[in-house]
Image (tube, helix red, strand yellow):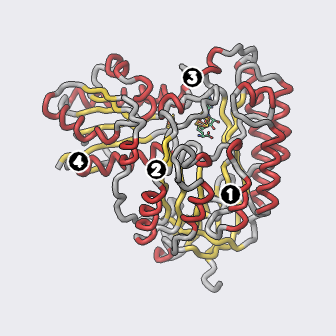
Amino acid sequence: MKSFYLETFGCQMNVVDSEQITALLQEIGYQPIDAPDLADLVLLNTCSVRDKAERKVYGHLGRFKPIKDKRPQLIIGVGGCVAQQEGQRMLDAVSYLDLVFGTHNIHRLPEMVQQVEQTRQRASETDFLDRETRLNLFPERSASESATRFVTIMQGCDNFCSYCIVPHVRGREISRLSAEILNEIEALVAAGVKEVTLLGQNVNSYGCKNDGELSFPQLLAAVDAIPGLERLRFATSHPKDITAELIDCFGRLESLCPQVHLPVQSGSDRILALMNRGYDAADYLDKVRRLKAVCPQIRLTTDIIVGFPGETEEDFQATLDLVAQVRYADAFTFLYSPRVETAAASMPDNASARQKQQRFDRLLTLQQRISGEIWQEDAGKILPVLVEGASKQGEGQLFGRSVWNRIVNFSGPPELIGQVVPVAINKVLRNSHLGEYQNNC
Ligand code: SAH
Ligand code: SF4
Ligand code: F3S
């Protein structure tokens, strides 16, 4: 039996792609293992959203060279967003690399691996396949043991935010057929899945390009109607495409969790325009206000870029003001990283690295205070928790998530795994809650 070792970087898109890579490799007789030094095939599924993520790939590849020196028959491959961006250049730069496959070429991987096995010729495939056939990239999903699953509903992005590599490495937006999505979710629910997260770079524009297709709010309603599905989430939504119909879903769909990730990127109208985001701070705040009106318990999370080219102290202050006003439960904050082929990479940038770092630290301090206050509101409450599995905290410990996607660790019998159970929240830590299972509720 042959084996493969697969390491995944980046966002949930890559996580789902890796599940698919695993299924495809199993079909040609490869089994997953955790030890690269014992594997016949080593693969990295990569991310290029920031420079640091991209450099990591080369660092990681270096770890496999000594293994390949000892066992030259080992096949080493790179897929994902760095592979898409670099293609043949990666093969030229890394002498011990055997194959490179792009984000639209996952279905070709089994054949590429078999070709390398037989001919020992190196191979690279990174063509974009923005055609209907790409929708067949989603094979039947095996029955799941896990209570939560991600389901891709669309891929690619047409937005071209000026800092972002994603449209360049994932191609144009393409939506799966709603009938396929609903079939897949029905099968997952029948196999015991309780929670589904619909995934796409910009889920709000789901179906817009396909005549007669459901809109995103209609798709949410159809998924919500599947009997047995307890929780529904989605990521990521672009603020410019949040419609009144979508906001209403938070008031009327029972399974839709009161949580939304709504990347704002900046609070400055000038920077938002330079970023090509298609909204200003007032539009964004208006949508947040309407979401909170329809669903008062909703909690928001966001992404923010600090140090975008030309960002002044005044622009940054506008970001701090917006963060204080929205009161996000969590924010993912990033220092701007110039990316090849993007418009922002050639914009003038006057702020020093030190200034940017100081802004980053100020934002983090503010956000940590707000996050602490919001999560503290859960202390002493009994919350419904969907139990996902055994916790790393120790014997007899389980973990699950609240409707707000917060990890809750507590002790309880393994039979609770896969169920929504009441847990009293005793302690609020920085990234998780500690609780006690309430078996008398
Ligand atoms: N599709 C999602 C996000 C994709 S990338 C969306 O549109 O919301 C995830 C986050 O990485 C972005 O929201 C942004 O905050 C950050 N990011 C993207 N490009 C970046 C860059 N060049 N430098 C720093 N952060 C970046
Ligand atoms: Fe990148 Fe913007 Fe598309 Fe998100 S919407 S993936 S930030 S280009
Ligand atoms: Fe990274 Fe590609 Fe996702 S660049 S963030 S893995 S779409």
Q: Earlier in the sequence, mark 4 or mark 3?
A: 4
Q: Nearer the viewer, mark 3 or mark 2?
A: 2
CB atoms of marks 1 and 3 within 8 Å: no
Q: Nearer the viewer, residue 391 or 108?
A: 108
Disc 3: which residue? 339
Please, what is the three-letter code of the amino acid marked with disc 2? Arg
Precedes in sequence: disc 3 or disc 2: 2
Dot 1 alpha-carbon crowd within 10 angstroms: few under 14, some 14 to 19, many 20 or more: many
User: Where does residue 340 sit, x and y in percent of width and height?
Assistant: 54, 20
Residue pointed to by mark 4: 30
Sequence order check: which comes first, mark 2 or mark 1?
2
Considering only order in the chain, which callout, 4 or 1, is on the residue closer to the N terminus?
Answer: 4
The residues bearing labels 1 and 4 have C-alpha atoms spaced at a distance of 39 Å
Confirm or reject: label 3 Cβ below 8 Å from ligand 1: yes
Q: Secondary structure at mark 3?
A: loop
Of badges 4 and 2, nearer the viewer stands 2
